[in-house]
Amino acid sequence: MNFANPATTPILVNGAMNQTYLNWFNLAHGSVVAVRQSGTTANRPAVGLWIGRVYFDETLGLPVWVKSVNPSVWVDATGATV
């Protein structure tokens, strides 16, 4: 995804947010939501994954991280697959 140079690109165009900025804010919002996500093992996310994404697994009582996206592999802090 290409982002505009903020020094030369207006945020608003004709009263609406420039699509480049809108895309960036949507991406940033999705990342922030993902970092704060938690739930049971059964409810771990299956989409919007990236290597290193964290999820607090309430079933295990531990944070887990994505080690592989396709197939999705989750590991704990020791590197053990969970």
Image: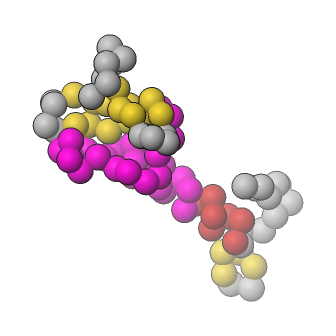
In this view, the residue farthest toward the top is 78
Q: Which residue does the image show at 42% across and 40% down from the upper left?
A: 72
Magenta-tinted stretch = 26-53
Question: Which quarter of the image is occupied by the N terminus?
Answer: bottom right
Front-lying residue, 42 or 10:
42
On screen, residue 56 versus residue 30, left or right, reads left
Quadrant in the picture for residue 20: bottom right
Does residue 6 appear in this view?
Answer: no
Q: How far from the left and from the top, in percent, is residue 46?
A: 38, 51
Q: Is residue 71 left or right of residue 78?
A: right
Q: Nearer the viewer, residue 49 or 5?
A: 49
Residue drawn at the location 47% of the way across and 34% of the way down:
68
- Residue 57 visible within the image: yes
Residue drawn at point x = 43 percent, y = 54 percent: 47
Q: How is the image coloured?
A: secondary structure
Question: Which residue is at a point 74% across and 85% down the rendered structure image?
Answer: 14
Q: Quadrant of the C terminus?
A: top left
In the rendered structure, does residue 41 fall within the stretch colored magenta? yes
In the displayed structure, does residue 31 sit left or right of residue 46?
A: right
Q: Quadrant of residue 59?
A: top left
Judge by depth and name the residue closer to the eye, 71 or 42: 71
In the image, farthest residue toward the right: 8
Relative to 12, residue 59 above or below: above
Q: Quadrant of residue 12?
A: bottom right
Q: Name the outermost residue toward the front.
A: 71
Tell whether position 37 is magenta. Answer: yes
Q: Position of residue 64 (x, y in %)?
A: 31, 30
